[in-house]
Amino acid sequence: MVKKSKPTPTMTIRGVRLFQGLLSREVQTEMLGQLREIARAAPFFRPVTSRGQNMSVRMTSAGTVGWISDRRGYRYETQHPDGKDWPPIPESILSVWTSVAPDAPLPDSCLINFYDPDARMGMHQDRDETDLDQPVVSISLGDEALFRIGNLTRGGKTESVWLNSGDVLVMGGPARLVYHGIDRIRPGSSQLLPDGGRINLTLRVAR
Ligand SMILES: O=C(O)CCC(=O)C(=O)O
């Protein structure tokens, strides 16, 4: 499924391991078809923060639990806000996890973020999971995105890297709780999504 079964990172920034170009165009296209089916069963929705602010990304999930945010706060739920179970995580996506995180148990959650040209994601830590020793694996599809990596506490100097379609990154070990976010995407930089935009898949062992 992926180009290499035991890939080595092409770059490591502050402990975040980057596997640039890991997914072939063929694999990306296959994933996109599977994501369309997921979105039919579990439509994208625009989450709000506990303060009632709309997030700029749209989201849905696959897996036994999905991450949601609403006026009650951030959490994992077993069902989409429509009241249906989340669809299963496709094998093609699970195989990326086993390739870059072979020692970790399989993820039970795949958050699917959709970025239109104006969407971004503020600096945050991923810490709603029960076992923070398990890594987070993130897959980029579509338009390029400027990914910012900070520190283990909020603030301080940061470093940024452009993520391209087919790139995979792993936040694990000492980098598991690093602050990170997406400053902007570069509209029109990829032809993968016919109508443009970017999809990010974030795989986690949530429970
Ligand atoms: O879109 C990305 O690459 C990052 C997504 C992210 O940080 C998250 O969903 O927590």
Image (spheres, rainbow, N blue to C red):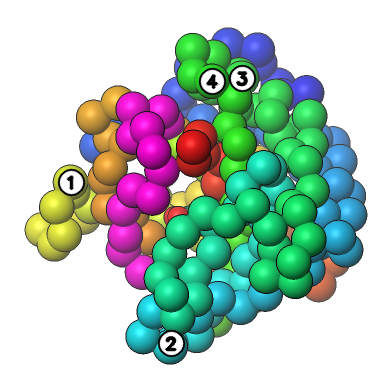
Some atom of ligand 1 lies within 8 Å of the CB belonging to the residue at label 3: no
* Relative side of 81 to 37, left or right: left
Pointers 3 and 2 in contact (CB under 8 A)?
Answer: no
The mark lying in front, picked from 2 and 1, is 2
Q: Which residue is mark 4?
A: 105
Q: Which residue is mark 1?
A: 152
| Magenta segment | 120-135
Can you say which quadrant of the picture contains the N terminus? Answer: top right
Q: In this rendering, is residue 114 above or below 139?
A: below
What amino acid is labelled 4 in the image?
Pro
Residue at the farthest left position: 156
Q: Which residue is mark 2?
A: 53
Q: Main secondary structure of the magenta part?
A: loop
What amino acid is labelled 2 in the image?
Gln
* Relative side of 128 to 23, left or right: left
- Position in image of residue 99 (x %, y %): 61, 19
